[in-house]
Amino acid sequence: MQQQVATESKDGKPGGDELSLAERAYRVIRDRLVMLEIHPGTPINEEQLAQSLGVGRTPVREALKRLQYERLITTYPRRGTFATEVNITDLVHISEVRQELEPLAAAQAARRATATDRATLTALRRELDSAEPSRRHAAELMHLDLQVHRAIYAATQNPYLEDTLVRHDNLATRIWCLFVDRLSDMAGHVGEHGPLIEAIVAGDPGKAAQLARSHVESFERAIRGAI
């Protein structure tokens, strides 16, 4: 089924015609890779992706260049381009970065979030509460987790910090998706965002940083427990 790239706006950033075709293609392909809808090790076919997104091959090619930089795809000489394998040994390296930068991002978001940022986070907080998390499908929970993280990163008003954390959160989410069937309390992990959002919206950087660090640490423990 063809997926039109014009609908992609999960980052809380402008969507539709405000984004270039390459940017929209990038976001859709990126999230397919992050959610393992494109399985690790799968060959990447530019023409097939272009057809599925309803765009030409040039926007797809531009998107793939960015995705290679972000370690979501890998190109091998004379073999082609493939979705990157998920390597559990990367968990410790990813966690090292996130344990330092996630608290910083949460604190800065608490200090700098605009009225629009706070409204976005408040809406996500309501979504967390709108239904019993334990009854939600795993994919829905993971999409919600991505939305919350990306909204927090955007609220830092620091594009360099935001880009760095989006990339590392994407890689962490791929590991999560790989072990999702073995995780006993995924809903509880996603639910931890509630107090974090409240601290950011309330403008409490100290509490926000503490909750963010705890969230990253609990994620790593959960993955290690599932291995």
Image: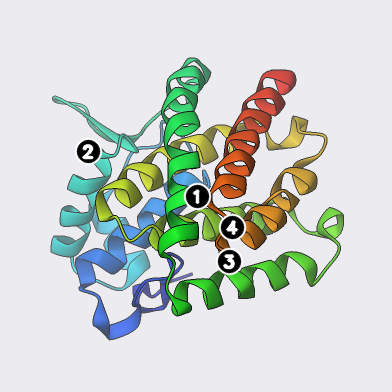
Q: Does 217 appear above or below 133?
A: above
Q: Nearer the viewer, residue 198 or 65?
A: 198
Mark 3 residue crowding within 10 angstroms, few (<14) / some (14–19) / many (20+): many
| Pointer 1 with pointer 4, Cβ within 8 A | no
Side of 55 relative to 34 (left or right): left
Question: Would you name the residue on which mark 1 appears?
Answer: 106
Q: Amino acid at mark 3?
A: Val
Q: Residue at x 33, y 61 (%)?
A: 157
| Pointer 2 with pointer 1, Cβ within 8 A | no
Mark 1 residue crowding within 10 angstroms, few (<14) / some (14–19) / many (20+): many
Structural distance between the alpha carbons of marks 2 and 3: 33 Å
Question: Would you name the residue on which mark 2 appears?
Answer: 69
Q: Earlier in the sequence, mark 2 or mark 1?
A: 2
Structural distance between the alpha carbons of marks 2 and 1: 25 Å
Q: Earlier in the sequence, mark 1 or mark 4?
A: 1
Question: Would you name the residue on which mark 4 appears?
Answer: 143
Q: Nearer the viewer, residue 82 or 34?
A: 34
Question: Would you name the residue on which mark 3 appears?
Answer: 201
Q: Residue at x 86, y 58 (%)?
A: 135
Q: Earlier in the sequence, mark 4 or mark 2?
A: 2
Q: Amino acid at mark 1?
A: Ala
Side of 39 relative to 195 (left or right): left
